Amino acid sequence: MWFRWAAGQTFIRERLLSDQAGYRGLSDLKGVERIINAHKSNDGRDFGPLLWRLLVLDAWSRCYLDTAHFLQGPPPPM
């Protein structure tokens, strides 16, 4: 429910629609924006569980995909 409030909207937009999220390429940013807008419209559709899953994916990718070790690629063969 808190994703419909102004602070929640700001938070999910900053996380899920950032340039960094687009760089990772794990989701379609236009599609995510449509989901956020549909959830905010409060027309009876509840996309909160889906938005939560996307936030968890974002948190995981920040921890594991955005590290220098991952971004450098695999180690050279021996």
Image (cartoon, rainbow, N blue to C red):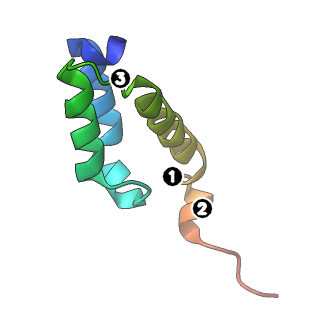
Q: Is residue 26 above or below residue 12?
A: below
Frontmost residue, 34 versus 54 = 34
Q: Is residue 74 above or below residue 1?
A: below
The quarter of the displayed image where residue 27 is located: bottom left
Q: Residue furthest front?
A: 44
Please give left or right for residue 38 compared with residue 59 in the image. Answer: left
Disc marking residue 34: none
Rounded to the nearest angstrom, the CA distance separating label 3 from label 1 is 30 Å
Image quarter (top left, top right, bottom left or bottom right) of the C terminus: bottom right
Residue name at image x 35 percent, y 50 percent: 20
Q: Which amino acid type is marked by label 1?
A: Asp
Residue name at image x 34 percent, y 40 percent: 16
Q: Which residue is mark 2?
A: 70
Q: Which residue is mark 1?
A: 66
Residue name at image x 50 percent, y 34 percent: 53
Please give left or right for residue 71 compared with residue 31 in the image. Answer: right
Please give left or right for residue 47 compared with residue 19 in the image. Answer: right
Image quarter (top left, top right, bottom left or bottom right) of the N terminus: top left
Q: Which residue is mark 3?
A: 46
Question: For the residue labelled by badge 1, is the local secondary structure a helix, a strand or a loop?
Answer: loop
Q: Which amino acid type is marked by label 2?
A: Phe
Q: Residue 24, image x and y in percent?
A: 42, 58
